Image (cartoon, helix red, strand yellow):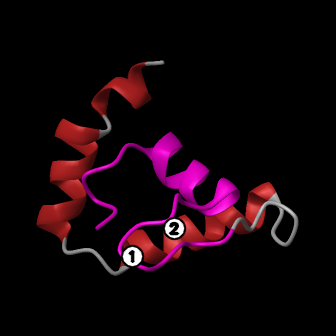
Amino acid sequence: MLWHRDFSMIYNQIAKGTMRFEGGQMPSFKQTLSRAEINAVIAYLMSLWSDETYHKWKNEINQTELEK
């Protein structure tokens, strides 16, 4: 689930990939996608969230990121 991570963590997961866990690993997309394309992927994923989930993410999870 992405909603419990702040924006920079989501971005880095897509750009850098993830560590191997439970038999799987997300590959890095930094050589494949531009910054704008990664941001578009994040925007698309967020568009699938309910309003309640987005507001919780924005107000609780991502608050420190927005204050930077």
With 4 as the anchor, is 7 left or right in this view? right
Q: Percent x, y for residue 23?
A: 43, 79
Q: Is residue 63 magenta?
A: no
- Taken as a whole, is the magenta stretch helix, strand or loop? loop
Residue at left 53%, top 66%?
42
With 34 as the anchor, is 52 left or right in this view? left
Residue farthest front in this picture: 23
Q: Percent x, y for residue 39?
A: 64, 60
Number of callouts in the render?
Answer: 2
Q: CA distance from mark 2 to mark 1?
A: 6 Å
Residue 64: mark: none
Rendered position, 16 above or below 29: above
With 3 as the anchor, is 44 left or right in this view? right
Rendered position, 23 above or below 7: below
Give the residue at mark 2. Answer: 43
Give the residue at mark 1. Answer: 47
Q: Magenta stretch?
A: 1-27
Category of crowding for the residue at label 2, using alpha-carbon neighbours closer than 10 angstroms: few (below 14), some (14–19), many (at least 20) = few
> What is the quadrant of residue 22 in the picture?
bottom left
> What is the quadrant of residue 3 in the picture?
bottom left
Q: Percent x, y for residue 8?
A: 52, 41
Residue at left 44%, top 75%?
45
Quadrant containing the N terminus is bottom left
